[in-house]
């Protein structure tokens, strides 16, 4: 009886170990897939994080911009300018530094987003739906 119980516990442990290994392999596959596709072109603007690398109208709807993170600037002095649908300035940075990311906390509701200027790099914008 005791041998059967030990064997049963050992079998369960082996099954759990196999499941954990399979899950870890799945995580590795997902992370590698994301890393291989982490710089989409043109801009990817779905979900709560927008990745902007192409100038133009991003959305005409109302959205809350929480943060803007400018990464991969290649040249000192490059800039970016973002306006709303009416042409009003949302945010700009005219002091890009090669290889140094810039993070801006905005937390502002805007109607429409247009990326007018992007000297180099990528903007990662954290957005949220507008709640009333």
Image (cartoon, rainbow, N blue to C red):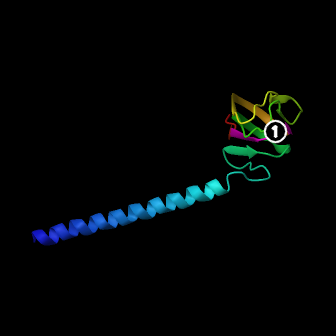
For the question of whether residue 51 can be seen, the reply is: yes
Q: Residue at x 44, y 64 (%)?
A: 22
Q: Number of numbered discs present? A: 1
Residue 100 picture quarter: top right
Residue 36: horizontal and vertical position, in percent? 65, 57
Instruction: Tell me if 56 is positioned left or right of 16 in this view.
Output: right
Residue 9: horizontal and vertical position, in percent? 22, 65
Residue 57: horizontal and vertical position, in percent? 85, 44
Residue 128 picture quarter: top right
| Callout 1 secondary element | strand
Q: Residue at x 28, y 63 (%)?
A: 13
Q: Residue at x 10, y 72 (%)?
A: 1
Residue 121 part of the magenta-drawn span = yes
Magenta stretch, overall SS: strand
Residue 92 part of the magenta-drawn span = no
Q: Residue at x 80, y 52 (%)?
A: 42
Residue 60: horizontal and vertical position, in percent? 83, 42
Instruction: Tell me if 71 is positioned left or right of 23 in this view.
Output: right
Image: 21 above or below 108: below
Q: Which quarter shows the C terminus? A: top right
For the question of whether residue 128 can be seen, the reply is: no
First to last magenta residue range:
116-126
Q: Residue furthest right?
A: 87
Residue 98 picture quarter: top right
Q: Which residue is mark 1?
A: 113
């Amino acid at each position: 009886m005791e041998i059967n119980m030990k064997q049963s516990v050992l079998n369960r442990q082996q099954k759990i170990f196999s499941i954990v290994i399979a899950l870890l392999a799945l995580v590795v596959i997902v992370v590698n897939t994301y890393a291989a596709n982490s710089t989409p072109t043109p801009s990817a603007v779905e979900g709560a994080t927008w990745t902007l690398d192409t100038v133009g109208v991003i959305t005409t709807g109302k959205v809350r911009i929480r943060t803007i993170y400018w990464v991969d600037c290649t040249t000192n002095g490059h800039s970016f300018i973002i306006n709303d649908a009416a042409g009003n300035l949302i945010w700009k940075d005219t002091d890009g530094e090669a290889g140094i990311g810039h993070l801006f906390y905005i937390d502002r509701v805007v109607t429409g987003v247009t990326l007018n200027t992007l000297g180099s790099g990528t903007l990662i914008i954290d957005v949220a739906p507008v709640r009333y």
